[in-house]
Amino acid sequence: MLATYTIIISMSLIIIASFLSYWFQSYFFDQKKEQFLDKSYMIQGIAMKYMERDGDATSQQVNDIITIISKYIKSDIWLTDSMGYVYAVSNKDHKEFMGKQVFGEELDKLRQGHTFEITGPYAGAFDKTVRVYGTPIINESGSFKGSIILYNSIDEISSPLKRVYEIIWISAIFAIIFSCIVIYYFSQKIIIKPLAEINSVARKISNGDVNKRVYLKSNDEIGELAQTFNFMADSVEKNEKNRREFISNVSHEIRSPITSIKGFIGGILDGVIPEEKEKYYLSIAYEEIQRLTRLVNDLLDMSAIEAGEFSLKIIKVDINEIIRLTVIKNETKIKEKRACVDVCFEEDNLFVAGDQDRLVQVITNLLDNSIKYVNEGGKIKISSKTKGRKAFISVFNDGPQIAEEDLLHIWDRFYKADKARTVKDSTGLGLAIVRNIITQLQEDIWVENKDKGVYFTFTLMKVE
C-alpha cells in the first residue's frame, strides 16, 4: 500500500513539475518577446530618423541607444535596412556582420509588416543555437524602412531557466520524500499497527487463547473492524465454553449409566450378587441402558437440528389427540408421582399445521419435564385454546418456580436450574430440542412463573 501511494504521489508530482517547467519556459520566452516588442518602439524612432538622414540622429547615437537598451533587456540587438543589410549592432563583437545581409525568407515577412521568431542557427551567422525575434520598421506612410533584430544564445537563456528547473525538481523531490514520510507515519499509526494487533490477537485465538481481545480507540473503519473482531471473539469464546461444557456434560451423562451397567453386570458375572437378586439388578441395568439410549437419541436430534438436517413433514394434525395419547403413555410415571393431570380443551379436536412425530416429541418432553418437577401429589394442567389463526398449548405444573436468572438459560443444553438436584431420567436436552422444533415450525415458545407454578406455552398455526 505504501509503495502504491508513493508511486501515485511521485507520478503526480513529476507530471506537475514537468508541466511547470514547460509552462515557465514558455512564460519566460513570452516575457522576453513582450519586453523586446515594448522596447522596439523606442528603437524605431531613432532608427527612422537615422534611415531618413535626419540630422538629429547619427550612427553613434543609434549605437549608443541600442547598446543601452541591449544591456537593459540583456539581449543583443541588430538594426537592418530595407534590403536586410546590418548597419548597427549593440555588441561590439558583432561588428563583423555590419554591411552584411543576414536575411533569408524572413525579409518577405518583415516587408509585409509581420514579426518573426526563430530558434536555431540564424542565417548562418552563428554556429550555436540562438533565439531570434524580428520586427519591421514602418514609417508613417506605410513604407518598409528596415527591421530590428533581437537575439539571445540559448545557453544564455537556459542559465536562469536551469536555476528555475532545479528549484522546481528539487521541490518535487522533497515533496515526494515528505509525502512518503507522512504516509508511512499515518499508515503505521492508522492502518499497519492496528491490523498487526488484530492479526496477532487472531493468531492467539486460533491457538486456543479465546480470552484475547483487540483494544483500539478509533472511529474509522479500522476501529469498526476491531469492534466486529471482538464481537466475533466473544462468539468464539462463548462457543468454546459451550463446547467444553457440552463435552463435559455428555461425558458425565454417558459415564454414569455405563458405570452402573458395568458394575451390575460385573457383579453378576463375578458371583458377588446373589442369584435371587440378579433379576432386580438386571432390571436396573436395563433402565440405565434405556437412559443411555434416550441420551444418544437426543444428542442425534440436537446434532441434526444444529446441522440443518432436521427435516419436518408438515401435515394437518389434531394436537388435542396427541395430548391425549401422550398423557395415556405417561400414566405410569404420573401415578408414581401421585400427580393429578387436568386436560382442558376448548373443542374436542384442534387441527394445526405441523410434523406429527415432532409434535409428539414436544408434548412428551414438556409433560416429562412437568412430571419430574411437580410436587409429590401435585397438579399438572395441559390446555389448548385458539385465538385468531393461532393455537396456544400450555403445560403447567405446580412445582418450584424458576428463578429469574435461570429463565434466560432454561433452553440451554444440559442446563439445570438446581445444580444440587440430579434426575436420572433427565438428559438435559429435552427443552433445547423442544425450542428448536418449535423454531423450525416458525412458531414461538416461552416460559413464565404464575399461579404458584410454571407455565410452558407454545403456538401453532391453526388449520380448518
Image: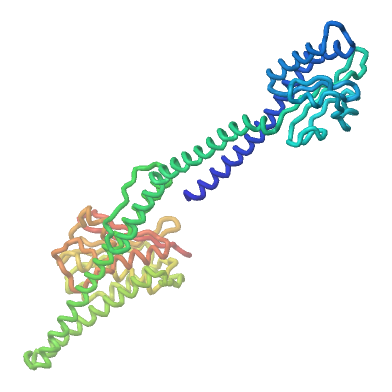
Q: Residue 420 or 197: which is nearer the viewer?
A: 197
Q: Residue 118 or 93: which is nearer the viewer?
A: 93
Which residue is at a point 16% across and 87% down the rendered structure image? 282
**Displayed quadrant of residue 12:** top right
The x and y percentages for residue 8 are 55, 46
Q: Residue 145 or 9: which is nearer the viewer?
A: 145
Looking at the image, residue 247 lies above or below residue 160: below
Q: Does residue 385 appear in this view?
A: no
Looking at the image, residue 358 lies above or below residue 114: below
The x and y percentages for residue 463 are 47, 64
The x and y percentages for residue 64 are 75, 13
Which residue is at a point 87% across and 28% down the rendered structure image? 101
Left or right, 37 with respect to 295, comes to right
Which residue is at a point 21% across and 67% down the rendered structure image? 340
The x and y percentages for residue 284 are 16, 83
Looking at the image, residue 103 lies above or below residue 296: above
Tally of numbered tags:
0
Q: Residue 415 or 144: which is nearer the viewer?
A: 144
